[in-house]
Each structure stands twice: as structure tokens, then as C-alpha cells.
Amino acid sequence: MTFAPNVFLIDAVYLNRVGKDMAAHFAPILGRELPEADLPLLLECLALDAGISAGENDIQVIFIYDSSVRRMDFCKPSDMEKELNDVAFRSRLGEFSVYSFQPSGMASREDLFVESLRLLGESKEAGRIAVVADEEAGRERMTEAVGEWKKKDGVTVFGMNPPAGPCRGFRFEMLGFAVLQSLGIRADEL
């Protein structure tokens, strides 16, 4: 697979869990029903947090999912096969190309995710990389893989809990801020 200069590798099962939990948590606090999150807006927020500036950027988004989540329940578009595979959209940040992959029966979602990280690390094309990994299932393996990368323009890891130890080879950003924005929650409401 050929990678773009900017690549997002996202565990769709983890992102779906975070999005659903945040919507369920904040709806009663705000006293209103929240709309489905706007996935393109979420991706733009992640891109900005990863250091991508407005311009003609090529941004490749790779979702890794399994049979437990074929559709993300908190956002639109949401169908991994029909709406979030081999599609693209343009924004002021550039063109986002979106792909979705699920493991074959011989590998787990976590194994496919870590193997994808390894391929990104070896890629000469991918410079700026953003990672949304399952903190519970794969943070240790992800941190180890990213820590071995060399010659990358910038690596940003998104999550809900900062790493306990040092961020070797990457910087950490809170995933929750981008999710809140995509759910239509304004700072003044909080």
C-alpha cells in the first residue's frame, strides 16, 4: 500500500466506544439530545490537533475495524464498508481519502492495527502520522512500535488518558476535545 504524506490510523471500535460514551455522558449534563457527530468535522479537528495547516494537503485516513463494529453508532457517515471505504472529501485542510479494513479470520483487530503501524513506520511517503489506538487493548504495543520510528515529520497519538510514562517519539493529544466539537458541543455550554 502506498501512503500519503499525512496518515491517520484509527481503531474504529475504540473511536466508536469513546464517541458513544461521550454522547451519553454529556447529553444529560447539557439537558439536550445531541446530534450524531459529524465525522468529517471530527477528522478535521484531529488534523488540526496533529499540526496540519490549511492548504492542499493529502490526508489518508485508515480505519481498522472488526465484526463487532461494522457501523459507528455515534456519527455520520458511519457504515465502514459502504460509506467509509474508498471515499474522499475536500476541506480547507486538503483532501481526505478514507479507507476501512478489517482483519481476516487469522488475525485480530489489534494485530492488524500493530502491523499497520509497522508498515507506516517503514514507509518513506508517510511523514506526519496521527494514531487513535485502543488504550486498553493496545497502548503498550502501539507505544513500542511508534517509539522505534525514525525520520517522521511528527507523530501524534490521540487518547482519553495521557500515557503514564514519557512519550518517546510522539506527542499526546486528547481525543475528547475533537469528539466534543464533532458532537456540536460548544465550550461555553460546559
Image (cartoon, grey):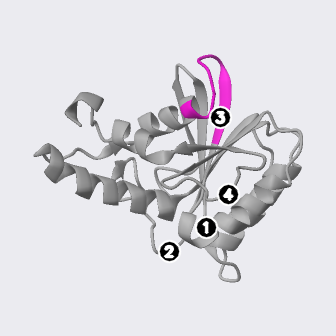
Identify residue for label 1: 102
The residue that disc 2 covers is 67
Query: Which of the numbered marks, if any, corresponds to residue 59?
Result: 3
Residue situated in front as seen by the camera: 149 or 99: 149
Of pointers 3 and 4, the one earlier in the residue sequence: 3
**Residue in the image at 71% along x and 52% along y:** 166
- Tell whether position 56 is magenta: yes
Residue at 61% from the left image edge and 59% from the top image edge: 164
Relative image position of residue 159 (x, y in whole percent): 53, 52
In primary-sequence order, the first of circles 3 and 2 is 3
Query: Looking at the image, which residue sits at the far top?
Result: 55
Where does label 4 land, which residue?
165
Task: Kindly report the distance in space between the C-alpha atoms of the residues bearing marks 4 and 2.
Answer: 33 Å
Q: Is residue 87 left or right of residue 119?
A: left
Closer to the camera: disc 3 or disc 4?
4
| Residue at mark 3 to residue at mark 1: CA–CA distance | 20 Å
| Kind of residue at disc 4 | Gly
Q: Are marks 3 and 4 in contact (CB under 8 Å)?
A: no
**Residues in magenta?**
49-60
Pointers 1 and 2 in contact (C-beta within 8 Å): yes
The type of residue carrying mark 1 is Gln
- The mark that comes first in sequence, 3 or 1, is 3
Residue 132 or 3: which is nearer the viewer? 132
Residue 152 placement: quadrant: top right
Q: Residue at x 67, y 76 (%)?
A: 104
The CA span between labels 3 and 4 is 29 Å
Please state which amino acid type lies under the numbered disc 3.
Ile
